[in-house]
Amino acid sequence: MRKSFDVVICGVGGQGIILVSDLLGQAGVLAGLPVRGTETHGMAQRGGSVEAHVRLGCVFGPRVPAAQADLLLALEPLEGVRYAWYLKPGATAVVNTAAIRPAGLKITYPDLKYLLEEIRKTGAHLLADDFTEQAKQLGSVKVLNVLMAGVAAPFLPVDFDTIMKALDLTVPEKFLSLNQKVLLWGRDYTRARPSGSKMAGEPRGSHG
Amino acid sequence: MEKKRYLLGNHAVAFGLVEGGLVASFAYPGTPSSEITEKLVELAGEGRFYVEWSVNEKVAFETAYGVALSGHRAAAIMKHVGLNVAADSLMTAAYTGVVGGLVVVVADDPAVHSSQNEQDSRRYACFAKVPCFEPSSPQEALEMARFCFSFSEEFGLPVLLRLVTRLAHGKSDVQLGGQVQVSRIKAGFKKDPLRFVMVPANARKAGQGLNEKQQLLAQAMEKVPFNQFQKAPGDTLIIAAGLGWLYAQEVLARRQEAWPMVKVATYPVFENQLKEALKEVRRVLVIEEGEPVLEEMVERFSRKVNPGLDIHGKMDGCLPREGEFSVELIAQSLDRMAGKPPRVFSSSPSLPMRPPVLCPGCPHRASFQLLKKVFGQSAIFPGDIGCYTLGINMGTIDTCLCMGAGISTGAGLARMESDRPVVAIIGDSTFFHAGIPALINAVYNEANLVVAILDNRTTAMTGHQPHPGTGETALGRKSREVALEKICQAAGADTVVLDPYQVKESLSVLEEIRKGKGVRVVIFRRGCVLLEKKESRSEIVVAQENCRGCKICLKSGCPAIQWLEKTPVITQFCTGCGLCVAFCPHQALVKK
Ligand SMILES: Cc1ncc(C[n+]2csc(CCOP(=O)(O)OP(=O)(O)O)c2C)c(N)n1
Ligand code: SF4
């Protein structure tokens, strides 16, 4: 059995996780792969913890099994740790370091260093940066999701042009050009890293 | 042939209903079922078929039933607890039967992602004695939805299509069929009082007829395309339903093993073939999400055909009784059966939780702040279901049972707790759904309570569907808007309408209401912030010099306010609603 390429996307309700999951899944289907996935709709979308799974080349169920994810795309660092148990050793974790603190009087938010270390402990290669800031600079925090999909793109078993094509199907026309711009930016960010898309060593820009 | 699409399970169901020749669809929103109707609205285009958001599930089902009695194909779509509301109608609709195909799509929520319980709709199918189909993938969901109409017409019975959250909100590449089926039933309602008027004499006969159909149904299920046998050597048979089938397939593929397997996708089950399969093995593992429906049947069948059969599943703890399944759980159950210690998977370290919260700028937060301030610590807030249930974090939701229960629970509490204020909380959509009879009852029977209707002009929790108070229909047509205040006044309740963001005015009106007696309705009217126009937002700034560090601003739980060392910080999520400005006692938060 050829193993599927399993992606877990996570973050906070409202960050646009579903759109990324749709983008990657559409790209897989355009590339002719069987794709399975699952999304969080409903209550958790109101600022709760959300996850989505995309399984490229999969003919089984929608959920990524424990310790089987090849890629974790965390739009928020605390959520990255919450779902890090999906990562298999040697996988890639693309993590946004910009924290969103859960609301509440008594909550203490863990130290970023600790959070990134927890993700590293899974044996995954960590690619962490403040992508929220990048998205802001490029136009809007709203496109953080697609920007990070761009960062993840070189790791996927689907070529970039196909992901670009899938973007046409997932994003409203009005916002397409900004989304194309940040998707490209994300890809180039990863490509410009010393080791290219093959991950090794300390990721540039890591705060940990 | 059309290219494959990447579809949500619910969207696949919508396509399936359309390919099955849907003429009219009726639904009340509810996670995880809402996207079916949303997709149907999109597909309806220029009147290809009719789509409706009905006021509740009972009304949705009965309206669909009416369409089916006139010989057309109809769907009623709801979440699992919606079927409780429609159950009265379903039970007897099974007696009268239908003429045109009637499909009831019910989405169950194992693991309770977005619900108040975990009930299994297959029990309703058995209870009502109607056929039930359960898909294991979006592709199969499409094919079943299409198939259900003709099956319903063949047996003259409503048919249940049971989904679960991971199917409804699961995704897959799906091949559309492309062609739309046409019903062979002659359209037009034909009077047949013996069949359609359930007076006792007719009901007795109809009940007998329904029982007689059961045998035919079970026989028909031996031939429907969805059940599946997978032959392999081995003395242990896996019987799986729904997603359990795929999880089991994945576990075995990874272990490079093949076991005999049966997929059960239809109820009543294909008894003969199943019994044959049970004869040939020593052991079975039954994999099904929800109640041990199949497991109980297997136990019953095995008594006749294989009394020594070793049965594993939910009842012996091989698989968990509650929640949803995963590849890991199925792998563990196989280990347990083999007497091996199940492999444990690491989970995340202990981390701060991130429960859902009211959005920044949510008008409900303002209403709750006002109610808390005026009615005080001793007040009881019987609640209801909607975004506003998240008021649990503010201490302003004390109960949540089912839709519409807040007002009636409040009336009961108020009767006993005469020295405490009772303020029932209910949303606008929920009020239309099941709140109106409760309000009438409370007024008529002289209850002493305040009813706060949080009118955010939408059904927010489930994705902002319209309702009669919005004056818009599912298909986007303008309709007659039903005014909440007129309904309340007609019921005989004293009624006021407030804007929760007019804090001063609201406080003084509420103060008067607090002193009153009888049923007093307060309608807090302010649109859900996610639907408001974004241009006119003001900016909130912190006047550091005024802040005394009292943290009162944090008490509302607004996610846009964070505390950094000694003062609050307003983050990018702020919508400028100004609630914190109104409640800060030291003018440390200022609207710019
Ligand atoms: C019988 C039943 N049907 C549907 C639901 C799903 N559901 C939960 S809350 C809700 C609507 C809430 O709308 P509203 O009362 O206007 O409150 P809002 O979310 O807008 O604050 C629905 C449809 C349910 N829980 N029970
Ligand atoms: S969706 Fe609307 S009603 Fe629901 S929490 Fe957000 S602002 Fe409030």
Image (cartoon, coloured by chain):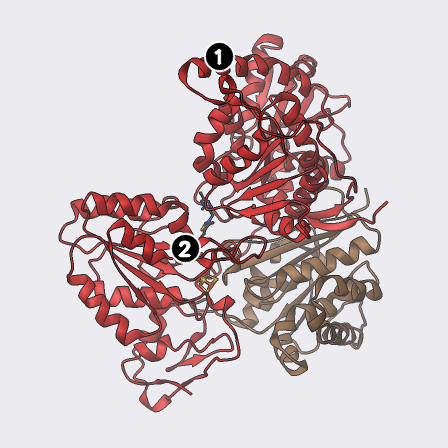
Chain colours: A brown, B red
Q: Of the two numbered discs 2 and 1 on the same chain, state the one appearing first in sequence.
A: 1
A48 and B501: which is toward the camera: B501
- Look at the image and tell me in which quarter the N terminus of chain B lies: top right
Tell me how many marks there are. Answer: 2
Mark 2: which amino acid? Val
Q: Residue at x 76, y 32 (%)?
A: B257
Per the rendering, the mark at residue A207 is: none
Q: Quadrant of residue B152?
A: top right
- Of B446 and B304, nearer the camera is B446
Determine whether the residue tagged by mark 2 lies in a helix, strand or loop.
loop
Residue B223: quadrant of the picture = top right
Chain letter for mark 2, please.
B
> What secondary structure is found at the residue carrying circle 1?
helix
Query: Residue B207: x and y, percent?
Result: 49, 15
Quarter of the C terminus of chain B within the rendering:
bottom left
Using the rendered view, name the quadrant where residue A78 is placed.
bottom right
Which residue is denoted by mark 2 in the rendering? B482
The residue sitting at the top extreme is B304
Q: Which residue is mark 1?
A: B205
A141 versus B197 height, above or below: below
C-alpha gap between disc 2 and disc 1 = 42 Å
> Residue at 32% of width from left, 58% of height from top?
B485
Q: Point out residue B237 in the picture as x, y percentages from the top left corner.
A: 68, 23
Ligand 1 within 8 Å of the CB at mark 1 = no
Q: Amino acid at mark 1?
A: Lys
Name the residue rendered at 60%, 67% in the picture: A117
Residue occupying the far left of the picture = B419
